Amino acid sequence: MRPKRVLLMVAVTASALSVLAALVSAQRPSTQFGLAATAALVGYVLLADPAVRRLRPALAAGIGLSAVLMAVELWWLPEQADVRWFTPFYAPLDGSGPSVGPVQIPPAMLDQLRQMIDQERFNAVGLLLGVVCLAVAVVALPVRQQPKAAELARFVAVLLLAVVGANLWSRIDGAPLLGLLGAGWPAFLAILMAAWVVALSGARAGRAALMPLGALLVAVSTAVALEDLTGTWLTWWEFSNGNDHVMVEAAVAVSVASSADVSAAISVDLSGAVRTAMALAGPALLAVGALRASHDAG
């Protein structure tokens, strides 16, 4: 069996295991399998046919940056914030104990939120660089005469940006926009670049729509990363400005979670599995589609 085919099978198998691990909330095994899948995909791209050698560096770099981010995430996992820092600030839901009054945000909580913002910004920078590399590969492909596919891709890209913008605007709620842009600039640039890749992919795709589909999944994963970063920053801004209402809501949510049965610790995390599947399938489909489109054009 050819090494390329073996690497592709390894990538598919490791991706499936990563999604299954994410489904049962096993974050570390999911990241480890995802790292193995990404490394195998980089090998698959590097062993591509000589006819598509001009695409290999950009595709390998874009996918390799995902592997770097996963390796950093494995290093960060033991240091991630623990939600138990909410527990001293809520009252039991059965009415016993003191009522929740004015609260004081401990400095440790704000420090943890700032650390989360820094980590998510670092991930956004890596994601931005990866999307730029993938964009270079897509731009290098020849343009085909398929106006309907090009128009549809541009429409999807504009629609995605409109949805992301509307969702972000609905969440600002008095927070300073410039502060949010200053904190999340790499994620904002990444979603703009990812939408541009989606718009370009329609006119450069081959007979199969693998590349546009992969570009769309990459863009959606980028939008999710933007949502995470902006959500963390908005929470930090609310806490640092003494918004007790937000504090009590978070405390009640933790109270409900802490009162659940211990067996719920191993639960089905469908959203986490979907996010993992998109993060792994997007670059893979885009790379395979780009290689096939380049080979067909040649």
Image: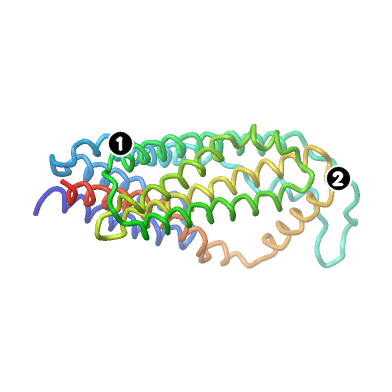
- Residue drawn at point x = 27 percent, y = 47 percent: 41
Q: Amino acid at mark 2?
A: Val
List x then y, in percent, for residue 276: 44, 55
Left or right: 156 as drawn, with respect to 103: left
Identify residue for label 1. Answer: 58
Kind of element beneath mark 2: loop
Identify residue for label 2. Answer: 103
List x then y, in percent, for residue 159: 54, 56
Residue 231 vertical placement versus 54 (above, below): below
As drawn, which residue projects farthest toward the left?
1
Of tags 1 and 2, which is closer to the observer? 1
List x then y, in percent, for residue 118: 59, 33
List x then y, in percent, for residue 197: 41, 45
- Residue drawn at point x = 47 percent, y = 41 percent: 193
Q: Residues within 10 Å of mark 1 (few under 14, many from 20)?
A: many
Q: CA distance from mark 1 to mark 2?
A: 51 Å
Q: Amino acid at mark 1?
A: Ala
**Which mark, residue 227?**
none
